[in-house]
Image (cartoon, rainbow, N blue to C red):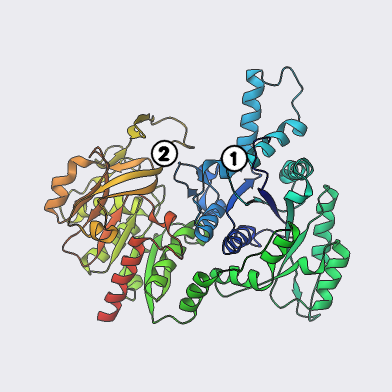
Amino acid sequence: MSDLNPKTKFIFITGGVVSSLGKGLASASLASILQSRGFKVRLRKLDPYLNVDPGTMSPFQHGEVFVTDDGTEADLDLGHYERFSGVSARKSDSITTGKIYQRVIDKERHGDYLGATIQVIPHVTNEIKEFIVSDLSDEDFVLCEIGGTVGDIEGQPYLEAIRQLAYDLGRERTMFLHLTLLPYIPTAGELKTKPTQHSVKKLQEYGIQPDMLLCRSQIPMPENERKKIALFCNIKEENVISALDVSNIYQVPLAYSHEGMDRAVCRHFNLPCPEADLSKWENIVNILKSPEGIVNIAVVGKYVKLLEAYKSLNEALNHGGIANKYKVKIKWIDAEELETNDPEDYLSDVSGILVPGGFGLRGTLGKMNAIKYAREHNIPFLGICLGMQLSVIEIMRNVLGVKNANTTEFDENCEAVVGLMTEWDKDGAKQIRHKDGDLGGTMRLGAYETILKEGSLAHKIYNSEKISERHRHRYEVNIKYKDQLKSAGMEIVGLSPDGGLPEIVEIPNHPWFIAVQFHPELKSKPFAPHPLFVDFVRASIEKSRLV
């Protein structure tokens, strides 16, 4: 740690009582309001699960897999971090117990420990500490969120590691922020502080005294309850911060700043606290509170029973609405419903249709029926990843009459319009994959360039000839069908730099029909909305005005 910038301060965010209180959102919001006061921030996530990454987890269990520019599959909280701070996450910002143990075991096999008996302390905790302080430059604050809740057996090595790090760096460079729940008991008519007290006591058992409490509640915290929490938890009264529920997540930075959270951080570190500029958040919240109208857009997916699986997509559509000063009302439709039912019954009341990515055969026919409905009824359509592949298959089947057109992901003996990629270029090096290889981390992951066809709708939207977008897929549309698709009215207007991989397709004679192989939603931010979503929502608004 000798090369660590001495000005860099570390804030460790833990959670207690129950999960899903919003540690990721709290971390992202704190980072954004510290930025508003002129500080440089970095955000990191420490996940206690034994998976190497969430890439092979079911979306129903874990939600969305967020992908960074450098090809890391990470927890969806990194999406919150990027959307709120604008700081692009990297591989070094996401760690799991699986990665930690993998490193420790590799070192042991290599003989790096010189015959020592390998133990959680110090070997595992040392790896965690090394991760926390690595790959940093001139950041003022590094915010590290610990996944799970205090008391989880999986999280104990992380709590021990941050306790040690606070000792190593000194308490003047570290801060512990603990997020808890203040449940409201209607029959008693009051907030209960006991769960928070117990959560803090549990944290203290690990040798950690929180410096700040962020208390989630449905109603305002009375002053006597604040005093009680401060007394029983050994925390300054002004560092007991109320975190009330809000109507939309972009109000959170404003609410936390209003509560004095950022000022308390500056006081803790004895730093000057420049005036905050929160105008961009105020502007976003004002648009969301008073939109000029509402537009209905359908998302036809297979994981709609857990909307966390589409977190970035949901937010990107909202960002498109903010840019157009409209509220986007999303109609979530289970793709399986459209396999046996008339799409008209589900889609006649929407002004835009989006088909997102996914894996596996289930629901794909329903997605294709939605694509066909959008194509034939001139409804603005955006397809993403599998949504692009199915758009190509749909037009091959229903316009060109190639009934066995399919992807080899679902049928090895089909007309392989979409097939498994086994080789591609990345940064000048050839990437090679095998059909029977590992699933985890083997897809075409991260940022790749696309060359746009001049005069295309995509070229107009991006206003650029070359773009960079994030990918997460292992199947690709076969370029050899380019001419057949064109004869059916669909053009490939975006290609990889070597011209071998189709990245974007359009239907020029349709009001707005674009499908892309990459995931544009991953780069959208409320104050920098992705141009594809901005224009898709604009086209949907125009469609709604025609009805």
Mark 1 / mark 2, whichever is N-terminal: 1
Image side of residue 274 versus residue 114, left or right: left
Q: Quadrant of the C terminus?
A: bottom left
Residue found at the very far left of the displayed protein: 487
Residue 134 appears in the picture as rendered: yes
Q: Quadrant of the N terminus?
A: top right
Instruction: Please give the residue where the numbered disc 2 appears in the rendered image.
Output: 443
Image side of residue 366 versus residue 32, left or right: left
431 up-or-down from 316: above or below: above
On the image, the x and y values in percent for residue 263 come to: 69, 66
Tell me which corner region of the image, top left, top right, bottom left or bottom right, holds residue 546.
bottom left
On the image, the x and y values in percent for residue 429 come to: 36, 29
On the image, the x and y values in percent for residue 509 come to: 16, 63
**In what element is the residue under mark 2?**
loop
Category of crowding for the residue at label 2, using alpha-carbon neighbours closer than 10 angstroms: few (below 14), some (14–19), many (at least 20):
some
Tell me which corner region of the image, top left, top right, bottom left or bottom right, holds residue 347.
bottom left
103 up-or-down from 408: above or below: above
Image side of residue 36 versus residue 446, left or right: right
**In what element is the residue under mark 1?**
loop
- The amino acid type, in three-letter code, at marker 1 is Asn
Instruction: Please give the residue where the numbered disc 1 appears in the rendered image.
Output: 51
Front residue (pair 369, 435):
435
Tell me which corner region of the image, top left, top right, bottom left or bottom right, holds residue 332.
bottom left
Q: Residue at x 62, y 52 (%)?
A: 140
Residue 306 appears in the picture as rendered: no
On the image, the x and y values in percent for residue 45 come to: 61, 48
Front residue (pair 272, 515):
272
- The amino acid type, in three-letter code, at marker 2 is Met
Query: Marks 1/2: CA distance?
Result: 17 Å
